[in-house]
Amino acid sequence: MELPDRLKANRERLGLSQEDVAHTIFVSRQTMSSWENGKTYPDVQSLLLLSQLFGASLDELVKGDVVSMKEMISKDALVMERLSIGSIMLILMGVACMVGLHAVWQDPTPIPFMTAGSLAGIGIMVACWIPALLLSLRIERIKKNHDLVTYREISAFMEGEEVPEDGEALSRRRPLLASAVKLICGAGFGMIAGFVLVIVVNALN
């Protein structure tokens, strides 16, 4: 992408330091540095402030970058879709094993209302949940590394579409926490569904 070079060139043209620019557009110097190094991408509001400061149009700043952003979105979206499917399949596999083992392995255990199959099924459920969590965290890492939310915002803005207003969303402020909450809730619902199915199986027997 060429935006990092344009930011640096415009800043140096005005004789400003990274700290000067950062202070003017209300971000940290580290944030400005990461933009110029191409590690992250500024959001729409920051781009508008930068264009005003540099006396350049938004189109001049991101010219040629929108296509690259769309390619990045498509590529990473495919990876995240596959990781999501893998995570879901692991959770479903764990639930299926929990229900299936309970149905076929009815040996009693010292734990009330728990058969050997139930305990083994819960163990497999946990064993499936851990890699599912890791896949989910990898998805959030991809989103954080490439700031996909920002890419979509800028792409939508440049296409004249409505810019999503999700800057205060938990997934934006705390991506890893949001991912963990989603997966824990998903696993929790899966466990509940599995126990309900176990009760139904017991009732039918």
Image: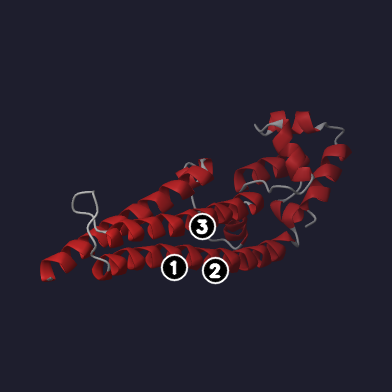
Q: Which mark is residue 131?
A: 3
Amino acid at dot 1? Met
Whether residue 9 sits left or right of residue 171 in the image: it is right
Residue 60's disc number: none
**Residue 137 percent coordinates (x, y):** 54, 52
Marks 3 and 1 sit apart, C-alpha to C-alpha, by 11 Å
Image quadrant where one finds the N terminus? bottom right
Above or below, 122 against 168 in this view is below
- The nearer-to-camera label among 1 and 2 is 1
**Of residues 146 and 79, which is closer to you in this image?**
79
Amino acid on which the number 2 mark rests in the picture: Arg
For mark 2, what is the residue? 82
Q: In which quarter of the view is residue 25 placed?
A: top right
Q: Circle 3: is it few (<14), some (14-19), or many (20+) Cα within 10 Å?
A: some
Q: Residue at x 76, y 49 (%)?
A: 38
Which residue is the site of mark 1? Answer: 89
Residue depicted at 23% across the width and 49% down the height? 110
Q: Earlier in the sequence, mark 1 or mark 2?
A: 2
- The span from disc 2 to disc 3 (Cα, nearest Å) is 14 Å
Query: Seen in the image, is 141 located left or right of residue 91?
Result: right
Q: Nearer the viewer, residue 199 or 161?
A: 199
Q: Amino acid at mark 3?
A: Pro
Neighbours of disc 2 within 10 Å: few (<14), some (14-19), many (20+): some
In percent of the image, x 56 and y 56: which residue is there? 139
- Front residue of 76 and 162: 76
Can residue 150 be seen from the camera position used here? no
